[in-house]
């Protein structure tokens, strides 16, 4: 399993448009990708679960990647977060 932490810098936090892009990106990998923050967690392929986390600006999230393509998925997801959140 690979993981990284990321502090959300988007003023609106994780809101609908980037969350939708996140789900689309996460579906490109066979690994299971999970977001965790402040005691809540959600699979990165489930839009409503991500939105239900209510992640705000300045919140630190942990992204966990587990599966056969975890190295590639983790690196590319980290780049995705830096570009979108």
Image (cartoon, rainbow, N blue to C red):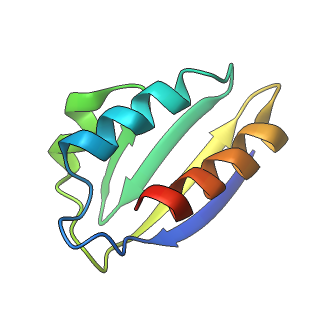
Q: Looking at this view, is 39 or 14 the one in front? A: 14
Residue 61 lies in quadrant: bottom left
Vertical side of 5 occupied by 54: above or below:
above
Relative to 7, 75 lies left or right? right
The quarter in which the N terminus is drawn is: top right
Residue 33 lies in quadrant: top right
At 21% from the left edge and 68% from the top edge, which residue is drawn?
A: 56
Relative to 78, 20 lies left or right? left
Vertical side of 31 occupied by 22: above or below:
below
The quarter in which the C terminus is drawn is: bottom left
Q: Is residue 5 visible?
A: yes
Locate residue 15, reporting x and y percent: 20, 50
At 82% from the left edge and 25% from the top edge, which residue is drawn?
A: 68
Relative to 12, 59 lies left or right? right
Vertical side of 24 occupied by 19: above or below:
below
Residue 78 lies in quadrant: bottom right
Q: Looking at this view, is 46 or 9 the one in front? A: 9
Locate residue 55, reporting x and y percent: 24, 61
Q: Is residue 43 visible?
A: no
At 22% from the left edge and 73% from the top edge, which residue is drawn?
A: 11
At 37% from the left edge and 70% from the top edge, which residue is drawn?
A: 8
Residue extending furthest bottom? 58
Vertical side of 12 occupied by 53: above or below:
above
The count of marks equals 0
């Amino acid at each position: 399993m690979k993981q990284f932490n990321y502090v959300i810098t988007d003023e609106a936090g994780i809101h609908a448009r980037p969350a939708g892009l996140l789900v689309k990106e996460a579906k490109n990998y066979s690994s299971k990708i999970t977001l965790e923050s402040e005691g809540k967690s959600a699979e990165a392929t489930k839009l409503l679960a991500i939105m239900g986390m209510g992640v705000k600006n300045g919140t630190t999230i942990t992204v966990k990647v587990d599966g056969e393509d975890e190295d590639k998925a983790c690196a590319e997801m980290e780049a995705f977060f830096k570009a979108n959140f």
